[in-house]
Image (spheres, grey):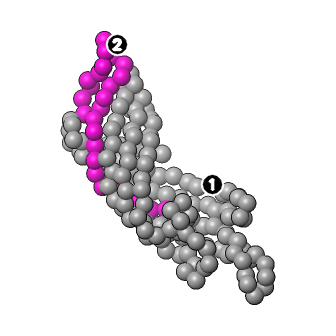
Amino acid sequence: MSYERFLSETVSLQVSAGLHSRESSFIGQSGFGVQEELQARFYLLKPENSSAGARQFFFFKGLFAGPYVYHRWRQQQISEWDWVAQQNVPIDQNINEVSGGVIIGAQIALGNVFYMDLFTGGGIKRSFGRNESSQQFYDITTVGYNGVLPKIGFNIGVGF
């Protein structure tokens, strides 16, 4: 869930919050968590009510760019192979992920009521709480990954 508030004609803040529900997969991971994100948006073109066509339905609201910060906490259980016991053992993890970077995107409106944002960018992510001695490989899609992270997003919502 997100909320965007304009601070001036060309600057806004977007605050997002979300929940991760419990899940299970074939490797036995399950988790629960929360996430928060803050985006500062600087509109390169002042958002206006300019529409295409005579019906006044499709409104281009503007191009934006700016920094973002993101945090996610996740409690999960993973299954790892224990070479001594010769079996999979469950490992509990509490992982905090913090990332930040830049985005660029566009905002359009349908009927000047339904809004859509499409953005892309990238940043750096750092994770805390994972087992560093683990034999598990952390790739870009894995909870607990550290490194450069691409970002892409699509938001839909209602504006007043």
* Horizontal side of residue 98 vs 82, given as left or right: left
**Vertical placement of residue 118 versus 96, above or below:** above
Q: Is residue 7 visible?
A: no
* Horizontal side of residue 86 vs 53, given as left or right: right
Residue 107: x and y in percent read: 34, 36
Predominant secondary structure, magenta span: strand
Q: Residue at x 49, y 74 (%)?
A: 128
Q: Residue at x 44, y 40 (%)?
A: 155
Residue 78: x and y in percent read: 67, 70
| Badge 2 amino acid | Arg
Q: Where on the picture, by quarter, is residue 55? A: top left
| Badge 1 amino acid | Ser
Separation (CA) of disc 1 from disc 2: 42 Å
Q: Which mark is residue 149?
A: none
> Which residue in the structure is indicated by mark 1?
21
Residue extent of the magenta highlight = 47-72
Q: Residue at x 36, y 19 (%)?
A: 57
Q: Which mark is residue 55?
A: 2
Residue 147: x and y in percent read: 43, 68
Q: Is residue 59 magenta?
A: yes
